[in-house]
Amino acid sequence: MSKTSISNLVSRLSLLIILSFFFTTVRADNAPDKELVSQGEVLFKENCKSCHAVHSIEVGPALKDVSKRRDAKWLAAWIRNSSLVIASGDKYAVDLYNKFNKAQMTPFPTFKDQEITAVLAYIDAESLKTPGDKPPVDDKNPPKEEVKDDTTSTIILILVVVVLILVLTTLIVFLSVIKRFLKDKEATLSESDKELVNQKLDLVVVVKSKMFITIVTLLFVAIAVRACWLGALSIGVEQNYEPVQPIPFSHKLHAGDMKINCNYCHTGTYKSKQDNIPSVNICMNCHTHVKEGPKYGKEGIAQVVKAYETGAPIKWVRVHNLPDLAYFNHSQHTTVAGLECQKCHGPIEEMEVVRQHSPLTMGWCINCHRETAVNSKDNAYYDKLLKLHADSKKKGDMTAEEIGATDCSKCHY
Ligand code: HEC
Ligand code: HEC
Ligand code: HEC
Ligand code: HEC
Ligand code: HEC
Ligand code: HEC
């Protein structure tokens, strides 16, 4: 190592900094016109959102990259009045119209050129984004949110390591330069300073030193304890469990987009201890008529029909499962306490595949019993207790805990 290598390092670093500035500015220049995009967003939400999304098929097709498929003139004509384009015999338009079962798109004859440009700019901008909670239409490219988060943190980690290595090399370079400089002047130094200058970094001595051994041992113990702790905490906890189901039944499509009530299918939720998975007969109420889905075409529903015709029950994989030692009653929570399904199951109506949203641990049950007031509305059963509660000078509402919902025996037989 020499002075030249230091200057080398410095010049490289500055080059790096200049380059990164350059790249950020270039990116900023390429960014679409923000004002136009936000005007387009408003227009889109008011006029198109009821039938379209950018990344998924709704009533109409996914609009991702539509301006790559069609030119501006075609798009303007289509948006102003799609039936005119279809009537003109345009093959693309006719095919699309047939593909969407001849659904009529609303005409927007009053849209100005500038407004159409704005809507398309918004669609273009959205097309660049990876879809958030809306999964892409293409089932070959499932959403990769978690993976993305992982890569971000890996990149940050790598950056940190690189910076640390840079700092370390700089330090070593400086050290050797200073040593060299002092060596030239050795004659003028005192005995102890001379010793310092001539000292060699001896790895063997370092490794054998007590300090080093203690630090390494402590580090090992800390890692082991942490691993055991995390392991113990997660025994039997299946939060985020998301098994693949035998038929691609989507809650997002049925409960979200079509807004079918939960208890149309889960008939037990409000009435009994156990909730239930619907039998195929309930599916057939609709699927005797509806034979084609947006994502899997005829294939998905054909599986439902086959199960119905052969009489073989569909082997749904159970997602939520408490151990036998715990007693849980649905109707107590839905009908009596008036809790929404989403409070415990999360946004089911947005899930393509059901995922266990809550940890389902004892701590989770008990925390909620401490925080949640009982539902005393229209429930004469609680009148007396409520009066007692009010008289007892306890602050706030009467929680589930106060009616005994944290007694061991309530949940354990
Ligand atoms: C009432 C529902 C509905 C509304 C509202 C609607 N569309 Fe459509 N759109 C459709 C349907 C359905 C199709 C598929 C073709 C067909 O069946 O006519 C479609 C097709 C399209 C296409 C062609 C897509 C492709 O893949 O080539 C574009 C572009 C489009 N719509 C843009 C818009 C814009 C922009 C708006 C809002 C200003 C809008 N649509 C509002 C239902 C709608
Ligand atoms: C059209 C019928 C239908 C509707 C409507 C429906 N579900 Fe389901 N649900 C099913 C089927 C079928 C399964 C089993 C397959 C699966 O897990 O996706 C299921 C599974 C579930 C599960 C997981 C059960 C387990 O295995 O632990 C939960 C929780 C659930 N639904 C909650 C809801 C909620 C909340 C709603 C209303 C927002 C709802 N469902 C609406 C049919 C339906
Ligand atoms: C109230 C009516 C109704 C009920 C009940 C119903 N479905 Fe559906 N389902 C539909 C409709 C409508 C579609 C097509 C939606 C579309 O094309 O946008 C569909 C689509 C589907 C698809 C195809 C999805 C795709 O993306 O291709 C599957 C699979 C499916 N349903 C399974 C089931 C199962 C299993 C049940 C019973 C647990 C069930 N459905 C109950 C109305 C219903
Ligand atoms: C207080 C929390 C809570 C609420 C509110 C709740 N659930 Fe559940 N749900 C659970 C728990 C816990 C389980 C697991 C039960 C078991 O394993 O015995 C479960 C299981 C299920 C199952 C799987 C079938 C079964 O019995 O194991 C379905 C389906 C279901 N819930 C649907 C619903 C629907 C629909 C609603 C709304 C009407 C709802 N749940 C409201 C906590 C809740
Ligand atoms: C979102 C909040 C919430 C969660 C989570 C929850 N509970 Fe509850 N639970 C309540 C409320 C509120 C009541 C009071 C219902 C009433 O008014 O009787 C209750 C009542 C009960 C009762 C009846 C208590 C009594 O004195 O009669 C039992 C048993 C119970 N819960 C078991 C469970 C179990 C087991 C779990 C976890 C798997 C759980 N709960 C999770 C809110 C919750
Ligand atoms: C609100 C309901 C509720 C109450 C009250 C409750 N438990 Fe639990 N308990 C559960 C649930 C649910 C599980 C299963 C949780 C799991 O698998 O992580 C459980 C699990 C356990 C387990 C087994 C632990 C394991 O890891 O397998 C023991 C032991 C236990 N509870 C003891 C108690 C005792 C003692 C009390 C009274 C101080 C009590 N519980 C009160 C709901 C409750």
Image (tube, grey):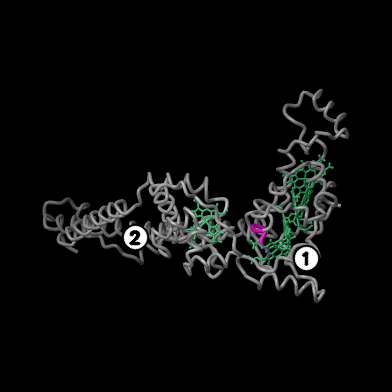
Highlighted magenta segment, given as a residue range: 249-253
Q: Amino acid at mark 1?
A: Met
Task: Name the one closer to the observer, 333 or 43.
Answer: 43
Mark 1 sits near ligand 3, with its Cβ under 8 Å away:
yes
The spot of residue 33 in percent (x, y) is 35, 48
Q: Tell me the quarter of the picture where residue 253 sits.
A: bottom right
User: 10 or 146: nearer the eye?
Assistant: 146
**Seen in the image, is 193 located left or right of residue 165?**
left
| Badge count | 2
Q: Which residue is mark 2?
A: 162
214 within the magenta span = no
Task: Determine whether the residue tagged by mark 2 lies in a helix, strand or loop.
Answer: helix
Residue at 65% across, 53% down: 256
Amino acid type assigned to the residue bearing label 2 in the image: Val
The residue sitting at 70% across, 43% down in the picture is 367
**Could you tell me what secondary structure mostly forms the magenta stretch?**
helix
Q: Earlier in the sequence, mark 2 or mark 1?
A: 2
Which residue is found at the position 54% from the left and 58% from the top?
A: 221
Question: Considering only vertical position in the picture, is 386 above or below 242?
Answer: above
Asked if 307 appears above or below 324 in the picture, the reply is below
Q: Quadrant of residue 400?
A: top right
Relative to 187, 379 lies left or right: right
- The residue indicated by pointer 1 is 284
